[in-house]
Image (cartoon, rainbow, N blue to C red):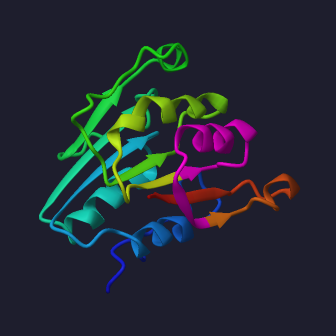
Amino acid sequence: MVNVFKNLGLKNNTNAMTPLQVEQIGEILPNKKDISVLEFGAGNTTVKIYEALKTKYSNVTYVTYEDNPKWAPTHKGIDVIMYDKKNLKDGKLSIPNDEKYDIVIVDGPDGELRKYWYEIFKDNVKDNTIIHVDDVFHYPSFESELSLTFKNYNIIFESGRKTWNSGNNKCWLTIKLK
């Protein structure tokens, strides 16, 4: 099977996700007609992922939550929801329960606030949903809150657990819900 996320033009040592972590997600994309993606923290990678998905799937639903207009894409087909970080921290954000996603990418906001997303989207996943958390080991709460919210999953990819403290700040965790 062709990995539609291979050679997207991503570069290491930028603010974007690395080519390797995006390619890994591409290795485990579901085989079906339609796909739905929920992303927290848009940026350089968002449009590239969306366009690559359109080459594989008949219908792509892509929703991203962003707090900084600088990173919010204005690309046809990507639904951008702007939010305030205070509302994230205070639990005042919600996603309609009838929205279910195949892939969830947690890549923002910067700092420890992204730990609050798990509780917000816990009702928007299903069996076999892929959850990818960028910079997962930067704060212990990113992984601990993930484990508290989602009890039954397999780790598919893990990178940087042992090296991010020693100068490598790129780390991620990709899980698949059971």
Quadrant of the rendered structure where residue 103 is?
bottom left
Query: Horizontal and vertical percent for residue 74?
Result: 26, 39
Nearer to us in this view, 34 or 41: 34
Q: Is residue 163 shown left or right of residue 95?
A: right
Q: Residue at x 74, y 53 (%)?
A: 169
Can you give x and y, in whole percent of width and height, for residue 29 in the image?
Answer: 35, 69
Which residue is depicted at the point 60% across and 57% down?
173
Is residue 14 shown above or below 67? below
Tell me residue 143's x, y (percent). Answer: 66, 45
- The magenta region covers 133-157
Toward the bottom, the furthest residue is: 1
Q: Residue furthest left?
A: 58
Comparing 53 with 34, the one in front is 34
**In this rendering, would 133 be left or right of 61?**
right
Question: Which residue is rendered at x = 85% and y = 52% of the image?
Answer: 165
- Across and down, in percent, residue 60 comes to 19, 55
Q: Quadrant of the C terminus?
A: bottom left
Indicate the quadrant containing the N terminus: top left, top right, bottom left or bottom right. bottom left
Q: In the visual, does 80 lie left or right of 131?
A: left
2 inside magenta stretch: no
Q: Is residue 11 visible?
A: no
Residue 128 shows in the view: yes
